[in-house]
């Protein structure tokens, strides 16, 4: 090969190197409080934002169970995978973040939160492989999980990851899932009419929820709890409110929940010219 050909090939190779994106840097799993996993790689979150536990009202029993379990996991003790299910806007996700922040206040290096997008479940095994090598505990968090009708692969993979499968989550990892339904997988009345193995059809869908050591239900709050949530935030931020106005806010939205209460508090702050 002539020198000109060699020079040309070298230039082409250099140009291709410049065009190719650099390989993504591996996440430093010991340096940050939280991470986002997109199915292939992790992005570090430098600050984990969460309300103080005292501001999460109307869910005292749920708060006690979840915080205790996260603290045990952070300390390296036996802990459960968790399914937080029930009414929208009642603090399931906020409670998980607050529990992690509370555990990190005691020891920032003990535990980190890793949020996985529902459409990134196929990359969960690769995530487990990375976390397994770390001297740290992790809570892998899947928010608002649900499976489409006819999707049998996703639920079976999740059951295998929780326990029993060859790719089950490592010992330093626990899973936390939030969902609107306890069964996660949608169910239909027609299942009850299946003439063949009708009980098996229902049991197979409920088996996914049964894999979680803790199943914690969240229910719509009553009027007193709704006002108590607003009152807690108002005291925290130095705001005043009228109960009748707060109740009218919830009536216009057709619901009472922690999320609706927070939206009302945000409205109060806006009226007062404040920033939360």
Image (cartoon, helix red, strand yellow):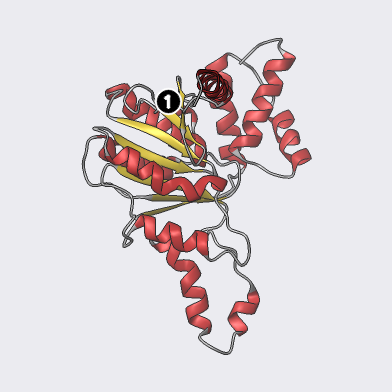
Residue wearing tag 1: 25
Q: Does the image show residue 178? A: yes
Image label count: 1
**Position of residue 206 measured from the top left corner of the image (x, y, whole percent):** 47, 67
Name above or below for residue 136 compared with residue 197. above
Inspect this view and state whether residue 57 appears.
no
Q: Position of residue 263 (x, y in %)?
A: 67, 29
Q: Nearer the viewer, residue 20 or 229?
A: 20
| Residue 227 screen position, x and y as percent | 60, 33
Q: Position of residue 178 (x, y in %)?
A: 50, 47
Residue lying at the far front in this picture: please name it.
2
Q: Residue furthest top?
A: 273
Question: Does residue 150 sit above or below 238 in this rendering?
Answer: below
Is the residue 126 above or below the residue 274 in the image? below
Residue at 74% x, 15% y is 271
* Quadrant of res 54: top left
User: Circle 1: is it few (<14), some (14-19), or many (20+) Cα within 10 Å?
Assistant: few
Q: Residue furthest bottom?
A: 195
Q: Residue at x 46, y 74 (%)?
A: 203
Q: Quadrant of the C terminus?
A: top right
Task: Choose between 197 and 9: the one closer to the eye.
Answer: 9
Q: Residue at x 56, y 39 (%)?
A: 225
Q: What SS does tag 1 mark? A: loop
């Amino acid at each position: 090969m002539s020198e000109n050909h060699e020079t040309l090939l070298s230039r082409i190779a250099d140009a291709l190197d410049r065009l190719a994106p650099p390989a993504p840097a591996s996440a430093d799993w010991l340096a940050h409080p939280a991470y986002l996993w997109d199915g292939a790689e992790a992005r570090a979150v430098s600050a984990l934002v969460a309300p103080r536990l005292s501001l999460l009202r109307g869910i005292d029993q749920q708060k006690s169970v979840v915080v205790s379990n996260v603290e045990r996991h952070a300390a390296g003790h036996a802990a459960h995978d968790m399914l937080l299910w029930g009414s929208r806007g009642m603090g399931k996700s906020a409670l998980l973040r607050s529990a992690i922040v509370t555990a990190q206040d005691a020891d920032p290096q003990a535990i980190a939160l890793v949020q996985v997008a529902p459409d990134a479940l196929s990359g969960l095994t690769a995530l487990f492989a990375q976390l397994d090598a770390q001297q740290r505990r992790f809570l892998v968090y899947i928010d608002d999980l649900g499976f489409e009708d006819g999707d049998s692969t996703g639920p079976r993979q999740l059951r295998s990851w929780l326990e029993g499968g060859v790719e089950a989550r490592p010992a330093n990892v626990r899973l936390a899932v939030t969902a609107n339904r306890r069964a996660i997988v949608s169910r239909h009345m027609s299942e009850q009419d299946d003439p063949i193995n009708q009980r098996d059809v229902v049991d197979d869908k409920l088996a996914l929820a049964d894999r979680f050591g803790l199943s914690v239900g969240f229910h719509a709050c009553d009027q007193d709890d709704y006002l108590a949530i607003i009152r807690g935030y108002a005291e925290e931020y130095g705001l005043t409110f009228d109960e009748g106005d707060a109740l009218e806010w919830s009536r216009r939205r057709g619901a009472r929940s922690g999320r609706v209460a927070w939206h009302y508090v945000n409205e109060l702050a806006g009226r007062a010219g404040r920033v939360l």
